């Protein structure tokens, strides 16, 4: 080794000492600012892959370098669950190891930009899993439920709606009466259409005159049937109960315009997804022509979708699937953005949201002044075996857990008893948990 190289090495060594001194001073300053609570570093990122109710519910577990300090987050994209698992394990995990777990917004922005291409359901769900796990960690560290970290409750619990459905109108009404007897004040009503695959109702079928052999759906027949349902609901259930209905983007925008006007007289609490996200510009017409309250957003991935609808006051309820939009952090911002425009929240909450996601929903519900209503689906025995501490339903109100973080512990041994694919049959099994297809009589595919 010559003299020049020796000199180089000596300079590098003294540089390293200088850097570590500077780092130590910076860390000391951070510790002082944090009142001595050391900043947890991310040590591991895992995905728990469980389907206790026959729906694939990927849940991200972020483990820190502090003993016993970890958190869970909902990353539930059940139709493409394997891809979310890969996005977390192959891309986010190496990106996050060693980073500070207590810088939630910073990490959200970093993850969002880390793929360069953004706003997709797979990546948003993966980010959500980490984001919500970080909130869980912060809550556990502070020994507080997340709702306390973002300002505390503005209401005691979240008013929910349940799903009343059936192949026949009377079945739907009987189911609605059961919900009402359990204290629910809001009910979503969906009825099947004879010989067709209606959304959200039993009685799916294939049409005898169809030019194909798959499930059939004809928008006009569905609309006529739905109008009869609302009429009968008002006759038998009265005016007091709040009725919701989901069109599930299945009809043409022009038909949706007429439908929004026709249902006006039934005074629905809201009509959901009258059109597909591709057609959101149509909301300007609906708004100008009728007073039916409109809910939208289940499929939204991007601020470019929800921002104009909120800022132009074109909808009444923003109904985003929280993990699909990137997690608790962006949805909290969305709720705050919507408040001055008097747009209320109705976060997506059926069985394809994990209990961690339901806890995040319930948290947003109780801390947001502009909360509207919460969709609810019960947690079956197996779900409660895996997820200990699910939000509690009582008299139509959902209560978030008061334990630190989301208040939920995942029993990973129980989770392993219900792997992805558990309970799946038929097309769902063949398609690896994917969504099937529905076509018009003539074979044209239906958006759904
Ligand atoms: Mg929906």
Image (cartoon, rainbow, N blue to C red):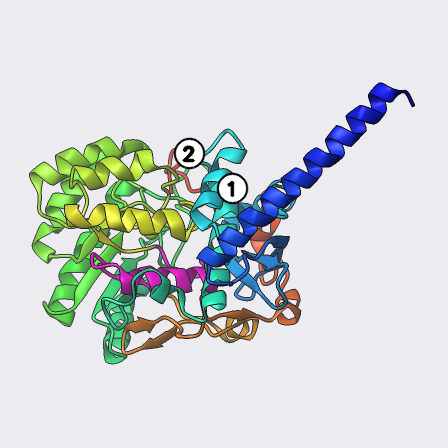
What label does residue 122 carry, if any?
1
Residue 367 position (above or below residue 94): below
Quadrant (top left/top right/bottom left/bottom right) for the N terminus: top right
Q: Is residue 39 visible?
A: yes
Q: How many marks?
A: 2
Residue 322 percent coordinates (x, y): 39, 51
406 relative position to 282: left or right: right
Q: 336 or 439: nearer the eye?
A: 336
> In the image, which is nearer the foreground, mark 2 or mark 1?
1
Taking the magenta stretch, the answer to whether it contains residue 335 is no
Residue 17 percent coordinates (x, y): 69, 40
Q: Residue at x 53, y 46 (%)?
A: 126
Residue 374 position (above or below residue 320): below
- Which residue carries the number 2 mark? 443
- Check the image and name the residue furthest to the right: 1
Query: Which picture quadrant has residue 41?
Result: bottom right
What label does residue 375 carry, if any?
none
Q: Residue at x 57, y 57 (%)?
A: 40
Magenta-highlighted residues: 348-376
Quadrant (top left/top right/bottom left/bottom right) for the C terminus: top left
Q: 387 or 267: nearer the eye?
A: 387
Residue 370 percent coordinates (x, y): 20, 56
- Alpha-carbon neighbours of circle 2 within 10 Å: few (<14), some, or many (≥20)? some
Residue 385 position (above or below residue 106): below
- Mark 1 close to ligand 1, CB under 8 Å: no
Q: Secondary structure at mark 2?
A: loop
Cα distance between the residues tagged 2 and 1: 29 Å
Of the image marks 2 and 1, the number of the one nearer the N terminus: 1
Q: Is residue 436 visible?
A: no
Q: Residue at x 60, y 49 (%)?
A: 24
Q: Secondary structure at mark 1?
A: helix
Q: 28 or 380: nearer the eye?
A: 28
């Amino acid at each position: 080794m010559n003299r020049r190289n020796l000199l180089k090495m000596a300079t590098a060594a003294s540089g390293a000492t200088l850097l570590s001194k500077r780092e130590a001073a910076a860390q000391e300053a951070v510790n002082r600012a944090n009142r001595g609570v050391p900043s947890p570093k991310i040590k591991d990122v895992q995905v728990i892959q469980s389907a206790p109710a026959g729906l694939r519910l990927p849940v991200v577990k972020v483990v820190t370098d502090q003993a016993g300090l970890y958190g869970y987050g909902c990353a539930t994209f059940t139709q493409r669950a394997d891809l979310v698992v890969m996005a977390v394990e192959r891309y986010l995990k190496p990106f996050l190891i060693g980073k500070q777990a207590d810088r939630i917004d910073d990490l959200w922005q970093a993850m969002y930009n880390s793929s360069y291409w953004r706003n997709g359901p797979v990546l948003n769900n993966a980010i959500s899993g980490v984001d919500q796990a970080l909130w869980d960690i912060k809550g556990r560290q502070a020994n507080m439920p997340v709702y306390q970290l973002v300002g505390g409750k503005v209401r005691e619990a979240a008013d929910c709606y349940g799903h009343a459905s059936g192949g026949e109108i009377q079945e739907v009404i009987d189911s609605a009466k059961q919900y009402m007897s359990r204290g629910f004040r809001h009910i979503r009503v969906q009825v099947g259409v004879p010989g067709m695959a209606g959304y959200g109702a039993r009685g799916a079928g294939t049409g005898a005159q169809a030019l194909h052999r798959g499930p059939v759906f004809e928008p006009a027949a569905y609309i006529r049937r739905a109008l009869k349902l609302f009429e009968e609901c008002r006759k038998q259930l009265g005016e007091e109960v709040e009725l919701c209905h989901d069109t599930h983007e299945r009809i043409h925008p022009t038909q949706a315009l007429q439908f929004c006007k026709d249902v006006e007289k039934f005074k629905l609490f809201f009509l959901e997804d009258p059109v597909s996200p591709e057609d959101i510009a149509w909301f300007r017409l609906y708004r100008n022509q009728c007073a039916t309250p409109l809910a939208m957003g289940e499929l939204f991935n991007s601020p470019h979708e929800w921002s104009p609808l909120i800022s132009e006051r074109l909808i009444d309820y923003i109904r985003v699937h929280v993990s699909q939009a990137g997690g608790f952090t962006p949805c909290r911002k969305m709720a705050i953005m919507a408040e001055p425009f008097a747009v209320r929240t109705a976060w997506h909450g059926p069985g394809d949201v994990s209990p961690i996601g339901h806890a995040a929903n319930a948290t947003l519900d109780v801390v947001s002044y502009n909360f509207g209503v919460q969709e609810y689906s019960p947690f079956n025995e197996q779900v409660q075996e895996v997820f200990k501490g699910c939000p509690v339903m009582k008299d139509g109100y959902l209560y978030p857990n008061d334990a630190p973080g989301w208040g939920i512990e995942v029993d990973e041994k129980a989770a392993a008893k219900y792997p992805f694919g558990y309970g799946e049959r038929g097309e769902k099994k063949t398609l690896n948990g994917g969504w099937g297809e529905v076509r018009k009589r003539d074979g044209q595919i239906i958006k759904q």
